[in-house]
Each structure stands twice: as C-alpha cells, then as structure tokens.
Image (cartoon, rainbow, N blue to C red):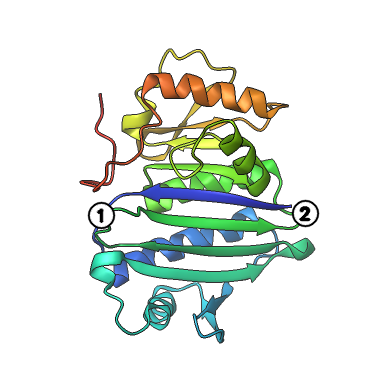
Amino acid sequence: MERLVRGFWGPRPETEAEVATRCVGFLTRLGAIFPGLPMKWHGVRDQGSETIVPADADAVAAHLRAVAGDGNDPSAVGHRIALYATAAEQTAIDISGNAGGRPQFAPHAIVVQVDGPGGDDRALLATLRALAEEWDIDWGDVTDDDLMDELEDAGLDPGSPTAGRALFLSRGRAARVSGAPLPVGAEPAPHAGAILDLSSLQSTEAVVAVNRSLEATGALQPLPRPMTGPKLPAP
C-alpha cells in the first residue's frame, strides 16, 4: 500500500539556496530513517527525462531550476520539488511539492509517498517529525488514499488539517489541544508543536472521533484564504 506523509504551510518567501538547504537536510534525515536509501536521488522533470541529484545544496538547487520550467515565477508560486529514490527491500520514496514563494490560495506542501515494506509506522512517524523540523510546517499528517476516502465519506476534508495515522500541529495549533478529550497523547515536536500518533487506533470511526474532538478546540482551522502568513496565530 502507498502511504503518504504530508506537510503544509502558508506563504514564506525563501531563496533557491534556502529551499535547497532545507531539502538537503530533509533528504539526509530520510537516509537515516530508511535503511539502504542512497544519497543520490532521481530528479524528475515535466518532460519525462531524469537526472541524478546528489544530496548536496548545489545539486538540489540545479534540480529546482530544472523543474521550474519556462514562465514559472518561484517568488510567487514557490520552487517545485520532484525527487525519488529506492531504499532497501524495494521501498520507493517519492517526494513532491513546492516551497519558498507567496502563494495566496494553495499552500506550500511537501508530500512523501512511501511504497514498499520499509514504510512501517515508526518510519512514517519519524518522517513526519523530520518534515516538521526541516520545513517548519503548519500542519502535517501520515495517511493513505483509502483512509482519506473514508474520512471524506465521514464529512472531513483531507485537504484541510486532518488527523490520519498521525498528525503534526504547529505551535499555535498545538496550544489549542491542551485539555481536549483524546484517546492518544500529544508528544512534543519541533518548533514547539505537537505530534499525535493515531496508528494504534483500530477503526476509522475512532480516527473520525479524534478529528471531531480536535475540531472542537479550533486546532484544525484551515489556513486563511487568501493566506496572510505561514502559521495559525497562537490563542
């Protein structure tokens, strides 16, 4: 089954070099999480051609320029990222997203798709923690297509802050969770945020119940449209 680790945040202008540095930090963390993951990644271009991208800032910056394409303004929409690699046990890691611009309606996002036996709950939770720390995200989750469909059937929007198999909340969101009646505890996370590990819950109904409790606290408010900043203000 394909599993997804996702992170989202609002406008945060950054240079190509700054985005490349964040990306290298994240790739390095993934190399420690997934055994056998190479420090060279395939860089995917829209035209279908591929190049090898070593995990260093200069090479990643070149990748960002290659996938930008003509007519794309990174200062507005952000720098696009498209990378993949294969770890031990034929676990495929695919990274896509954009970062570093001033989007008004579609948030910045990094999505890590993990396909293969190496993506167990511990690895996925560690990936979410690394994503939160390296990219300073507003919220993120661990999920899969089936779970997103089930949550959508329950009236939840997987495109807005939603708890899946795990959930990261930034500082402002995490501050709202204190005292909420939840079946799982919130663990401290990077940038004074919190991570909720829901992987032990045995049913979609239980996950939906957690989402309802979090909604009541205000922790799952969507980013404003148009977006005015990268984080939900602290209460």
Q: Which mark is residue 26?
A: none
Identity, as a three-letter code, of the amino acid under mark 2:
Pro
Secondary element at tag 1:
loop
Mark 2 or 1: the one toward you: 1
Looking at the image, residue 53 lies above or below residue 230: below
Q: Position of residue 11 (x, y in %)?
A: 26, 53
Q: Residues at badges 2 and 1 in contact (C-beta under 8 Å)?
A: no
Task: Categorize mark 1 by other alpha carbons within 10 Å: few (<14), some (14-19), many (20+).
Answer: some
Q: Secondary structure at mark 2?
A: loop
- From this viewpoint, is residue 15 visible? no
Q: Measuring 43% from the left and 64% from the top, which residue is drawn there?
A: 23
Horizontally, residue 98 falls left or right of residue 162, namely: left
Q: Residues within 10 Å of mark 2 (few under 14, many from 20)?
A: few
Q: Residue at x 34, y 65 (%)?
A: 19
Q: Position of residue 29 (x, y in %)?
A: 53, 56
Question: What residue lies at 25% left-to-right and 23% top-to-bottom?
Answer: 235
Residue 161, compared with residue 50, is above or below; it is: above
Where is 215 relative to 28, above or below?
above
Residue type, label 1: Gln
What is the quadrant of residue 69 in the picture?
Answer: bottom left
Residue with the mark numbered 2: 117
Query: In the image, residue 94 lies at what x, y percent?
Result: 59, 64
Left or right: 78, with 149 as reference point: left
Using the image as rendered, state which of residue 52 and residue 98 is in the foreground: 98
- Does residue 83 appear left or right of residue 117 in this picture? left
Residue beneath label 1, please? Answer: 104
Q: Pick the residue in front: 186 or 163.
A: 163
At x 60%, y 35%, the residue is: 153
Residue 85 position within the rendered picture, expressed as x and y whole percent measured from the top left: 63, 70
